[in-house]
Image (cartoon, grey):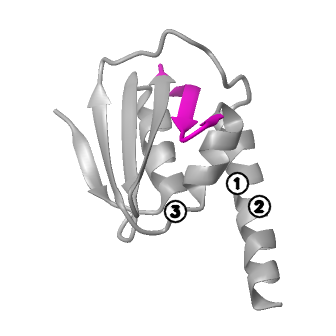
Amino acid sequence: MALQGSLADIAFPDVIQLVTVSGKTGVFTLNSEGAEGKIYLKDGQITDARVGSLRGEYAVYEMAMWQRGQFIFTPSVESDQVTVTKSNTSLMMEAARRLDEWRVLQRK
């Protein structure tokens, strides 16, 4: 059974937290304004991410900025690479910090 929804209804960090707590393995496919990204998890921990030419944590940070679009979680899909070694909590905290900075810069 796949989990899917809209980033406008469920914020990206909330979606990641839900899968982290449940310890799922699989892939999130996110689509926003013509861009597609993938975030792979193993036992609830992000292990790989890619969007465009970005890989690893920078890809996670890019997708964390997306406020519109769709996501779908497909269970039991694993990446053959590990490009993310930080904890999900560290990733989400850094993503939140970057989003705050982006909002401040956008106002100026």
Locate the N terminus by quadrant: top left
What is the number of the mark on residue 66? 3
> Which of 13 and 37 lies nearest the eye of the viewer?
37
Kind of element beneath mark 3: loop
Q: Nearer the viewer, residue 12 or 82?
A: 82
In percent of the image, x 57 and y 25: which residue is there? 48
User: x, y (%) of residue 65?
Assistant: 59, 61
Q: Residue at x 38, y 30 (%)?
A: 27
**In the image, farthest residue toward the top:** 80
Q: Quadrant of the C terminus?
A: bottom right
Q: Amino acid at mark 1?
A: Ala
Say what amino acid the circle numbered 3 marks.
Trp
By secondary structure, the bulk of the magenta-drawn segment is best described as strand
Image quadrant in which you'd find residue 49 = top right
Q: Are marks 2 and 3 in contact (CB under 8 Å)?
A: no
The kind of residue on which mark 2 rests is: Arg
Q: Which residue is mark 2?
A: 98
Mark 2, secondary structure of its residue: helix
Q: Are marks 1 and 3 in contact (CB under 8 Å)?
A: no
| Residue occupying image coordinates x 29% and y 25% | 75
Q: Which circle's residue, 1 or 3, is located before the other in the chain? A: 3
Q: Which residues are magenta?
A: 42-54
In the shown orientation, is residue 41 left or right of residue 57?
A: left
Residue named by callout 1: 95
The numbered mark at residue 25 is none
Q: Nearer the viewer, residue 82 or 91?
A: 82
Does the magenta portion include 49?
yes
Q: CA separation, marks 2 and 3?
A: 12 Å
Q: Position of residue 41 (x, y in %)?
A: 48, 25
